[in-house]
Amino acid sequence: MSGYNVKRGRSLLNTPGPTNVPEQVQQAMVRNPLDLGDPRALSMIETCFRDLKKIFKTEHEIFMYAANGHGAWEAALVNTMSPGDLLLVPELGNFSTGWGEMAEALQMRTETIKGDWRQAIDPAKIRDRLAADKNHEIKGVLVIQTDTATSVTCDVPAIRKAIDESGHPALLFVDTIPTLAVTDFRMDEWGVDVAVSASQKGLMMPPGLGFVAASPKALEAHKKATSQRRYWDWSLRLAAESYRTFCGTSPQIQLYGLRASLDMLLEEGLENVFARHKRLARATRIAVEHWGQAGAMELNAINPDQYADGVTTILLKEGYDGTKIRDVCRDELQCALGGGLRNLSGKAFRIGHMGDMNEPMLYGALASVEATFAYLGVPYTPGGVTKAIEYLVECRKRGGKA
Ligand SMILES: Cc1ncc(COP(=O)(O)O)c(C=O)c1O
C-alpha cells in the first residue's frame, strides 16, 4: 500500500457550504436532549429567535425549520404564493435558476430576466419589467444576494429602489443562504419582504436548520396564499408553544449549536465578521489573478463591485478541467473545494472562504490549489499564496481594513 493512502493531519474544508464547524459549536451539541418542555430549553430557544433577528437585522417574524436551504426556499414560496402566481427571476447563476425551478414545481409560474452568470442583472431591467406589468400579475421577485455558483453578488437596496420606482406591489424575496453573517444584510432597512437562509455557511453550523424571516407585508400575503402546506405553515407556527413553533419536536440539539454560533458572531461583532470575510475574499482574488497571468484561468465575476465575500469562482480556459482540479485537491491534498455547477460544470472550481475561517486556513487552501496546478500541469504563475500573504499582512498593519 502506498503511504499516500493513509491520510494524516487535518483536512481542509474550503467549500462554500458546508463550512467548518468551530469547536465551541461542536461541543455545544454534544449533549443529551432535555425534556421538550424544560424551561431551560425553552428559554435557550427563545434567545436564538431573539439573536437571529440581530443577524437578519429585523424586528419581524422569523420561522425556523429542521431543513436545508431548499426547505427554507419552499417554506418562503408556499407561505406567500398560490398556484398560478407569477414570479420574476433575475438570473444570477445556478441558485436563481434552482429557486425558479422549485416555484414551477410548486405550480407557480416564473419569468426569468436572462443574465450571463458573470454579472448581476441591472436593477433597471427589473424596474422596467414591473412597470410594464400593469395588472400586477407578478407577485414576487426572487433575488439571490450572492449566487454561490458564480460568486456574483447583487445590490439588494438598488433592487428595492427599482421595485419602488416601478410602483409595483410585488414581494421582494432575498436568498441570504451564503451571505448571512458573511456580507452585510439589512432586512428591515432594505425593505426585504421575505429573507431565506440556512445554517451551514456563515452561521458556522452543520447543515440542517433553515430560516425564513417575513415582513408584515409577507404575513398579509400569507393570509391569501393558497399553496398546500402543513409543516412549513406560518399560521400554525405563530402559536406561542414551542411544540407549535416547530410544528412538532424542536431540533433542540442543533439549536444549542446555533446558540453557540450566535454567541461567537455577536462577540466578534457583525462589522468585524464582514470585514474578515472581505479580507479573505480579496486575498483569494489576488492569488487567483496572480495565477491567471499564465493564461489558464480568471475570476468568473467581472465587476469588482459585485465580488462575493464568501466564495470565489474561478473560470478555467477551454481545455482545463475544474472537476479534475477539485477531485485531485480533495483526494490527494485533503483540501475540499467547490466544483462548477450547472452551466459551469467542469469549467470552473470554487474556493470557499466563509464562516469559521482565518488566514492560515486560507493559506492552506491557496497553497493546496497551487500544488494541485503543479501536480496536474495546469499553467499558473507561481506565488499566488505569497501575494495573498503580502496583502493580508498589509491589512494587519492598517488595523484589519480590507
Ligand atoms: C445561494 C444558495 N441558495 C440555496 C442553496 C441551497 O441550500 P441547500 O443546499 O442547503 O438546500 C445554496 C446551497 O449552496 C446556495 O448557495
Image (cartoon, helix red, strand yellow):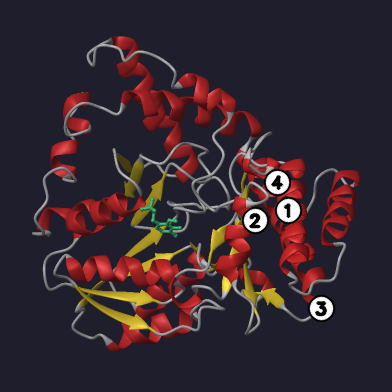
Residue placed most toward the observer, 83 or 71: 71
From the image, which quarter does the N terminus lie in? top right
Q: Residue at x 11, y 45 (%)?
A: 230
Give the mark nearest the N terminus, 4 or 3: 4
Please state which of the two labelled residues, at mark 4 or mark 3, is closer to the viewer: 3
Identify the residue at horizontal 77%, vertical 48% (top origin). Answer: 363
As drawn, the label of residue 294 is 3
Amino acid at the residue labelled 2 = Cys
Circle on res. 368: 1
Say which residue label 4 marks: 276
10 Å neighbourhood of mark 4: few (<14), some, or many (≥20)?
many
In the rendered structure, which disc, 3 or 2, sits on the residue that comes first in sequence? 3
User: Alpha carbon of mark 3 to alpha carbon of mark 2: how far?
Assistant: 20 Å
Q: Are marks 1 and 2 in contact (CB under 8 Å)?
A: yes
Q: Quadrant of residue 307?
A: bottom right
Q: Of callouts 1 and 4, which one flags the residue occurring earlier in the amino acid sequence?
A: 4
Position of the C terminus by quadrant = bottom right
Helix, strand or loop at label 4? It is: helix
